[in-house]
Image (tube, grey):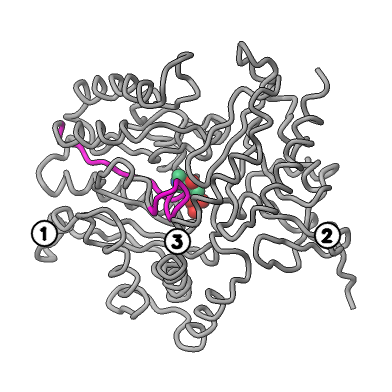
Amino acid sequence: MNQMDNSTLMQRDLKVLWHPCTQMKDHETLPLIPIRRGEGVWLEDFDGNRYIDAISSWWVNLFGHANPRINNAVKTQLDTLEHVLLAGFSHEPAIRLAEQLMQLTPPGLDRCFFADNGSSAVEVALKMSFHYWRNTGRSEKTRFITLTNSYHGETLGTLAVGDVALYKETYEPLLMKAIGVPSPDCFEREPGESWAEHSEKMFAHMEQALVQHAGEVCAVIVEPLVQCAGNMRMYHPVYLQLLRDACNRHNVHLIADEIAVGFGRTGTLFACEQAAISPDFLCLSKGLTGGYLPLSLTLTSESIYQAFYDDYEKLTAFLHSHSYTGNPLGCAAALATLDIFASDNVIENNQKTAKAMAESVAHLTDHPHVAEIRQTGMILAIEMVKERSSRTPYPWQERRGLRVYRHALQRGALLRPLGNVIYFMPPYVITEEQIRQLAKIATEGIELATSTD
Ligand SMILES: *Cc1c(COP(=O)(O)O)cnc(C)c1O
């Protein structure tokens, strides 16, 4: 029998795996944690240590690990149909999922195109927008407008419309040139200025970019309300209202990338609801399957769909596909996830959970190394700084966030700070007791990480 403990598995792993988003040399000193099982908010490793999954395993998990209801749905589907191609063929879970999402998403999104990961859903939206304008005689529209500090995935197309330097800069020579507009990020607001005032003021930059570039622009792409990978920076819904109106006036599409913020993260089922807008494209993934399986989709309007609908010889069709597009197991997990939303009053109950999250860290508000605690719904972020009044950041090389990560692991929590931003984005099944536990661990971690110059 092979020995199954953390250290044996870590050694085997490090001989053969290359991990995502990781400088592998870090693992000379940083433990790699092999997970044996999950249950609810808990992850358990091979030495029997347990960790609260405070970041929902990269923002995907909604209703806990090994959720019995989603498990059953996937098991039933597995014995029925594991996969079939979605070109020329179809299956009931995909149809039912598309039907249900049309009811739940903002009005006017009447067509569902499936893919299998978030980046691909964004690629689909970018290609469809460009292709729509081409099919309607506007082939000079070839560019995209994006916000600074935005993130839309890791493929070359999505990196091009993103703006997180750490992921993007190296590949810059390979990327199409997007038009960058300053983000409405409210961390940057003036003292005394409200979120709404700041976000509204920042819209002037977008209006200016549209006036200047609309003729060559296919679409504006945004992450509604929270730029998650961009250190959980947040803005006010008024920006989305102004943006919807401006895109209409300038004849440019609006792509809402709700891959991270969809399915209740911001306090409403979809973030766009808070601005009462419908985008021309809505990209969904991550929470879509409750965090179970890779699945994504891009919703769009009937009128955009119709611009592709013609005789084959006209060559206007959208000939894009991925092997696992619309996988039935993923669709079954997604349907079970939507069932839980429908039957368990999730959005309403989350309001209490969100309030408990806020209260749990209120004592850090005036901490000398905390510049801001911000929250949108079920996403709460604590920004650590070297000097509070001037908001001087710690040099990134010091990796203060990593100290919090290490401490949390020792104390039984998976917190994975983004730079110097510690955040909670937990599964919705987290209890108030567990939230208090997390807050305690995060507080200790912040004290530890900020106690030396
Ligand atoms: C995670 C994420 C993506 C990319 O999804 P993947 O499944 O990781 O390719 C795109 N946009 C946003 C806003 C995300 O958070």
Count the numbered circles shown: 3
Q: Of all residues shown, which one is farthest toward the bottom?
A: 79
Query: Where is residue 95, by image quadrant?
Result: bottom left
The residue lying toward the viewer, choosing from 405 and 68, is 68
Estimate how packed mark 2 is, as few (under 14), some (14 to 19) or many (20 or more) residues with alpha carbons within 10 Å: some
Beta carbon at label 1 within 8 Å of ligand 1? no
Q: Secondary structure at mark 3?
A: helix
Estimate how packed mark 1 is, as few (under 14), some (14 to 19) or many (20 or more) residues with alpha carbons within 10 Å: few
- Give the residue pinned by disc 1: 314
| Mark carried by residue 430 | none
Estimate how packed mark 3 is, as few (under 14), some (14 to 19) or many (20 or more) residues with alpha carbons within 10 Å: many
Residue 185 appears left or right of 208: right
Q: Is residue 163 above or below residue 301?
A: above
Q: CA distance from mark 1 to mark 2?
A: 60 Å
Q: CA distance from mark 3 to mark 2?
A: 29 Å
Q: Are marks 1 and 2 in contact (CB under 8 Å)?
A: no
Q: Are marks 3 and 2 in contact (CB under 8 Å)?
A: no
Horizontal and vertical percent position of residue 418: 62, 36
For the record, the magenta segment spans 250-269
| Mark carried by residue 49 | 2
Q: Amino acid at mark 1?
A: Lys
Q: Residue at x 36, y 32 (%)?
A: 146
Q: Amino acid at mark 3?
A: Leu
Q: Amino acid at mark 2?
A: Asn
- Give the residue pinned by disc 3: 288
Residue 12 appears left or right of 103: right
